[in-house]
């Protein structure tokens, strides 16, 4: 049975979510020094919600910003600032809470929502801009009601409003030109009180916040530590309450007496391909790459079996995953890979360059294993290490390489994921095109509001992505966190991807 992680409760063809509690995990009230210490592996280049390039970095924005909707750890879309919403043929109508205040004292209301949407629509270069391509503008219909004016229905918009584009910034801060790259301008449960770019962010609890269950501790400190061994050392010494782990650290963390949270979900590792470079525009060449890779060997050697081989952009158990694209759709078959190269007119092979995260376990070993496997069929993979925090900008925005080894998925709604990674001209589609008629399928998915229709169309898109080998899916890693058993009673990692939720997390 497929997991129906829908973007909202599905009614009679209309998306509508009634008010429900937003809250996090864990048990009793915080104790000790009341500080939640988190060791994470990434650092943001900017805290401006519209400049955050990837979902994982919402680890840093979640404490200080409320969103219009809330992407819960199980991947479902829940109310947050909006208590309910519904579509017409030309609008998405929203009703908001009436008890929310930004940290600078400005009240949140429909006018504040409008200011944010207008800022979003003006930010054409934003990584989240393509998620809102269906939005032409916004109309305030009451003090706490507003309508997004649509050029077409897009059923993924409620989920998009729980992502970076839905994080609400104080309209006063917008008007005053506050430097949002390093300053707080939110209405969230915590206020940013210290920020050292590339190193550390510190947040303190806001008095009078509308959802006290979201404030499990007095203070949150998130340290960006790219060195995996340093993170593990901090975890084992119990300096940190929550620590992001790599697969090679799992057994060491357990052996040190730490509790470990592990979860697979919508995150997968793939080779992003720029089909405008090298010979990657040749479908047969991409198919050859896909069949030359031994995914089982990768799981064993690189992930210590803490992953699942995959050939799909969505997991098979998820409602958007297609039964026609099983894990072995791209089975390991070197002979077939060589035959495909011959059909491609590349009997002597070809070469391409791939970026990977330098010094970030497990990517260097992963990249070298891929290089070895591709060499066996005559494909030369030239590796270029890049700092993990510069990897996405270098590949997606500067477009300075043929390919990149990195994470895909990590978006709550399949419509969003397809739009941002595969639609023509989208931010995370370095190739710029969408072969196989995928653009049309993505448009049909956006129009569909009945869940049964969305499932069928999303699965059609999944099949096209595999047939066209738009990227090369490899494995679904487990998201791993080490937990200090003395302070953390429980932790619910995100089904969506490898970010560190802190909303509602409590200490013993």
Image: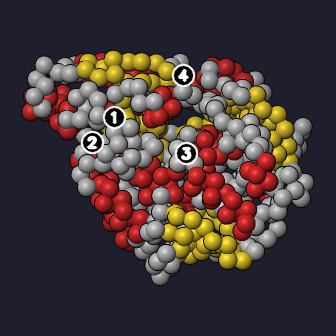
Residue visible at 68% across and 68% down in the picture: 82
**Would you identify the image quadrant in which residue 70 lies?**
bottom right
Q: Earlier in the sequence, mark 3 or mark 2?
A: 3
Residue visible at 80% across and 36% down in the picture: 202
Q: Nearer the viewer, residue 471 or 243?
A: 471
> What residue is disc 1 on?
273
Q: Specify whether residue 505 is in view.
A: no
Residue 3 image offset from top left, x and y in percent: 45, 60
Residue visible at 37% across and 51% down in the picture: 423
Tag nearer the camera, 3 or 2: 3
Q: Secondary structure at mark 1?
A: strand
CA–CA distance in space, label 1 to label 2: 9 Å
Report the number of discs. 4
Please, is residue 344 above or below residue 93 in the view?
A: above
Could you classify mark 4 by the number of other residues whose Cα lies within 10 Å: few (under 14), some (14-19), or many (20 or more)?
Answer: some
CB contact under 8 Å: marks 1 and 2: yes
Q: Secondary structure at mark 4?
A: loop
Could you classify mark 2 by the number of other residues whose Cα lies within 10 Å: few (under 14), some (14-19), or many (20 or more)?
Answer: many
**Disc assigned to residue 469:** 2
Tag nearer the camera, 1 or 2: 1
Q: Earlier in the sequence, mark 1 or mark 3?
A: 3
> What residue is disc 4 on?
387
CA–CA distance in space, label 3 to label 2: 26 Å
> What residue is disc 3 on?
126
Q: Specify whether residue 244 is in view.
A: yes
CB contact under 8 Å: marks 3 and 4: no
Residue 48 image offset from top left, x and y in percent: 67, 43
């Amino acid at each position: 049975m497929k997991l129906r992680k829908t973007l909202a409760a599905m009614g009679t063809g209309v998306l509508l979510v009634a008010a429900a509690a937003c809250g996090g995990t864990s048990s009793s009230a915080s104790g000790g020094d009341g500080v939640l210490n988190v060791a994470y592996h990434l650092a943001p280049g900017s805290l401006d919600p519209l400049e955050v390039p990837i979902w994982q970095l919402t680890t840093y924005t979640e404490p200080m910003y409320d969103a219009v909707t809330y992407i819960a750890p199980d991947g479902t879309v829940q109310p947050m600032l909006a208590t309910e919403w519904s579509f017409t043929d030309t609008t998405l109508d929203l009703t908001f809470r009436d008890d929310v205040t930004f940290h600078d004292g400005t009240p949140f209301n429909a006018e504040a929502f409008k200011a944010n949407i207008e800022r979003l629509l003006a930010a054409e270069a934003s990584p989240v801009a393509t998620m809102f391509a269906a939005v032409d503008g916004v109309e305030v219909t009451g003090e706490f009601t507003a309508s997004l004016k649509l050029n077409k229905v897009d059923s993924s918009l409620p989920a998009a409003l729980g992502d970076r584009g839905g994080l609400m910034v104080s309209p006063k801060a917008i008007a005053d030109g506050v430097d949002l790259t390093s300053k707080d301008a939110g209405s969230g449960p915590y206020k940013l009180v210290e920020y050292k770019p590339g190193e550390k962010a510190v947040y303190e609890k806001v008095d009078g916040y509308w959802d006290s269950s979201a404030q499990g501790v007095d203070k949150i400190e998130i340290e960006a530590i790219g060195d995996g061994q340093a993170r593990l050392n901090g975890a084992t010494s119990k300096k940190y309450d929550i620590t992001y782990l790599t697969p090679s650290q799992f057994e060491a963390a357990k052996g040190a007496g730490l509790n470990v949270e592990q979860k697979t979900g919508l995150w997968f590792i793939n080779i992003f391909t720029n089909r405008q470079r090298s010979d990657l525009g040749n479908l047969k060449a991409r198919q050859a790459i896909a069949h030359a890779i031994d995914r089982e060997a990768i799981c064993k050697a690189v992930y210590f079996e803490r992953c699942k081989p995959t050939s799909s952009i969505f997991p098979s158990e998820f409602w958007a995953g297609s039964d026609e694209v099983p894990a072995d759709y791209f089975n390991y078959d070197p002979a077939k890979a060589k035959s495909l190269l011959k059909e491609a007119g590349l009997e002597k092979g070809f070469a391409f360059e791939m970026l990977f995260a330098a010094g970030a376990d497990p990517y260097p070993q992963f990249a070298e294993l891929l290089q070895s496997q591709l060499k066996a069929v005559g494909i030369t993979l030239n590796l270029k290490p890049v700092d993990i925090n510069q990897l996405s900008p270098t590949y997606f925005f500067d477009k300075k390489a043929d390919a990149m080894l990195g994470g895909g998925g990590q978006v709550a709604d399949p419509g969003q994921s397809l739009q941002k990674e595969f639609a023509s001209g989208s931010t995370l589609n370095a190739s710029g095109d969408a072969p196989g008629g995928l653009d049309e399928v993505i448009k049909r998915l956006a129009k569909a509001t009945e869940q049964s229709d969305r499932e069928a169309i999303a699965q059609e898109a999944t099949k096209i992505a595999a047939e066209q080998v738009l990227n090369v899916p490899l494995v679904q890693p487990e998201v791993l966190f080490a937990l200090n058993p003395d302070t953390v009673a429980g932790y619910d990692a995100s089904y969506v991807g490898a970010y560190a939720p802190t909303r509602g997390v409590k200490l013993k």
